[in-house]
Amino acid sequence: MDATQLLKGVLDVAVLAVVESEDGYGYDVVRRLRAGGLEEVGDASVYGTLRRLYSAGALTSYVVPSEEGPHRKYYGITPQGRAMLENQRKVWTEFARTMNQLLRGEAA
């Protein structure tokens, strides 16, 4: 099974989970996802996901000046994003339970 295909389906919720506890700029979000075990996540995929979630109202953004390079655009979760994340946690939990049963050969 190709993990990159699985990652495409869960990247939105993974990004929301990463910024839930602490705002982050693009590469920081990438780094935290990789540190969390999603080593195969691509920079462009994360940046696209951040833009899409921002456009959907799930994230807010603000710019922080930097003395050592370009300004950084930080993303934080909105109340709408928190609601999306909570819903996706429930969906994921049920999906994972069902898949685990199937993979163990148990009846659903």
Image (tube, rainbow, N blue to C red):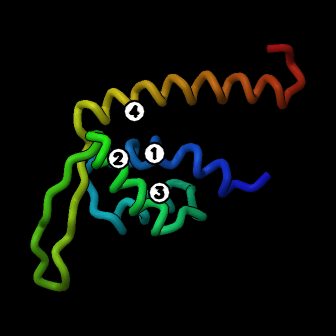
Q: Are marks 2 and 3 in contact (CB under 8 Å)?
A: no
Q: Are marks 1 and 2 in contact (CB under 8 Å)?
A: yes
Residue at the spot x=58%, y=26% of the render? Answer: 93
Determine the secondary structure under disc 4. Answer: helix
Query: Total number of numbered labels?
Result: 4
Determine the secondary structure under disc 2. Answer: helix
Q: Quadrant of residue 92?
A: top right
Residue at the spot x=19%, y=84% of the render? Answer: 69
Name which of mark 4 and mark 3 comes first in the sequence: 3
Determine the secondary structure under disc 1. Answer: helix
Which amino acid type corresponds to the residue marked 3 in the rendered image?
Leu
Which amino acid type corresponds to the residue marked 4 in the rendered image?
Leu
Which amino acid type corresponds to the residue marked 2 in the rendered image?
Leu
| Front position among marks 2 and 4 | 2
Determine the secondary structure under disc 3. Answer: helix
The local crowd at label 3, few if under 14, some if 14 to 19, many if 20 or more residues have their Cα within 10 Å, is: many
Return the residue at label 4. 85
Where residue 29 appears, as percent x and y from the top left, is 37, 59
